[in-house]
Amino acid sequence: MDLLKTNTFKVVGRLVSQDLKILNKKTDGSGFISGNVIIEANLDGAKNEFEISFYANEKTQDGKISSLYTTYSKLGELVGKKVEVTGDIRESRFWSSNANQMVSAQKLSGRFIHGVAETSNDEGSWEIGGFVVEGLKERLTKDNEVYRYDLTLGQANYRGDSMSRFVLHINPADKEIVDGVGKYSVGQTVQVNGDLRFIVTEVRSERKNEGGFGEPVVKVFTNRQRNFFITGGSAPIVTAEKGMYSSDIIRSLVAAYKAADVQLAEKGKVSGGSSSEEEMVTRISNKQASLI
C-alpha cells in the first residue's frame, strides 16, 4: 500500500503580477516556461500576498505541446482578475554560509490556475499527510511569551527514497488545536489541514530630532508573515492500508534526508568549512522529541 503523501494547497484571490518566462534548457535546447505569480487575497480582514511558482516543459514525453505550458504562457491575460490556484507545498533546502548551517524554506508550487467569478470568496488553505518528525514546539518572543507553536511532519518523495520536511503552525489562541496536536507523538502517521495566511502590513516608524529642530524622520517598511496554521487533524493512522509509515521506513527516509544534507553542505561550504553527519536514527519511540 502507498505511503500517505497528501500535499495540496488552494489559493483564491486577485492575480496582481506574473513574471513567467519562456526559456530553453542548456542541455538539449528544449523549451520550458518558469516563473512566479503574486496573488492578493483578503482573509480575515487582512491583506495576504501569495507568491506561487510555476514550471512546465514545452512538450510532453510523447512530443505534444503541454497543456500546462500553454496555460502558463497566457497568464498575462489574467492579471488583474480573480483566479484559483491549486498545487503542492515544497521544501527548498540549502546551505547558508552566513548562518553556517542548513536552511529550509517552504514554497507554494502551482500546477493548475484558472479564472473565477469576481464574486468568488478569497481563500488560502492546505492539507498535508506524513509522519511526525517533531512534536508540539513553543516559539517564544524576546519576553518569553509564546507567539506560535510548531509541528514538523516528514513526507516521502515520489520515489519513496527520500523525504521532505514541513513545519506547520498553531495559533496559541486555538486551545483545541494546541491540545489536539499536543497528543501526537514522534513517529506517528497523521494528516492535518489548515489555513494559509501570508499577511502583509506596512509599519510606520518615526524618530524625532531630539534637541534639534524640524520634522521627524519617518520610515515605512513592509512586514510579512508566512503562516501555515493548522485548523484540524486526523487521529494517528495505524494501518499500512491507510498509508502508515513504519519505523523501518521512517529510519530509511530520515537517513536519506540527513545524507542529502551532508552533500548539500559540502557543496555549499566555503573553503575551511567542515561538515559532519548527524547520528542516524536507530529507533522510534514516544519519548523522542525529534527525528531530525
Image (cartoon, rainbow, N blue to C red):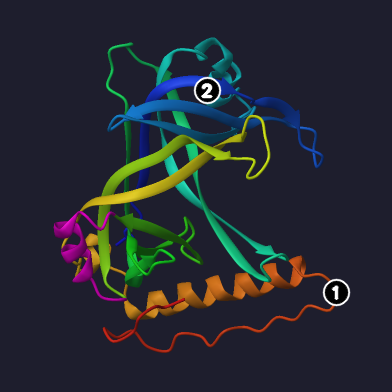
- Estimate the x, y position of residue 170 in percent, counting from the top left: 29, 56
What residue is shown with label 2? 67
SS at mark 1 in the image: loop
What amino acid is labelled 2 in the image? Ser
Closer to the camera: disc 1 or disc 2? 1
Alpha carbon distance from label 1 to label 2: 45 Å
Please say whether residue 173 is one of the residues in the magenta stretch: yes
Instruction: Give neighbour class at mark 1: few <14, some 14-19, many 20+ (Cα, 10 Å).
Output: few
Q: Nearer the viewer, residue 265 or 215?
A: 215
Q: Is residue 250 above or below residue 1?
A: below
**Percent position of residue 270, x then y:** 82, 70
Q: Which residue is mark 1?
A: 271
**Residue sitting at 82 percent across and 39 percent down?**
26
Instruction: Please identify the quadrant where the N terminus is shown.
Output: bottom left
Question: Image point 62% across, 68% down: which residue?
Answer: 102
**Position of residue 117 in the picture relative to residue 35 (left or right):** left
Tag 1: residue type?
Answer: Ser
Q: Position of residue 212 (x, y in %)?
A: 68, 40
Residue 230 included in the magenta stretch of the image: no
| Number of marks in the rendered image | 2
Residue 84 visible somewhere in the drawing: no
Q: Is residue 175 left or right of residue 163?
A: left
Q: Is residue 7 visible?
A: yes
Span shown in magenta: 171-186
Label 2 SS: helix
| Residue depicted at 54% across the width and 39% down the height | 205
The front one of 25 and 45 is 45
Quick one: which residue is furthest to the front in this view?
211
Single out the residue that lies furthest toward the right: 271
Which residue does the image show at 35% across and 15% down from the upper left? 116
Identify whether 142 is placed above or below 56: below
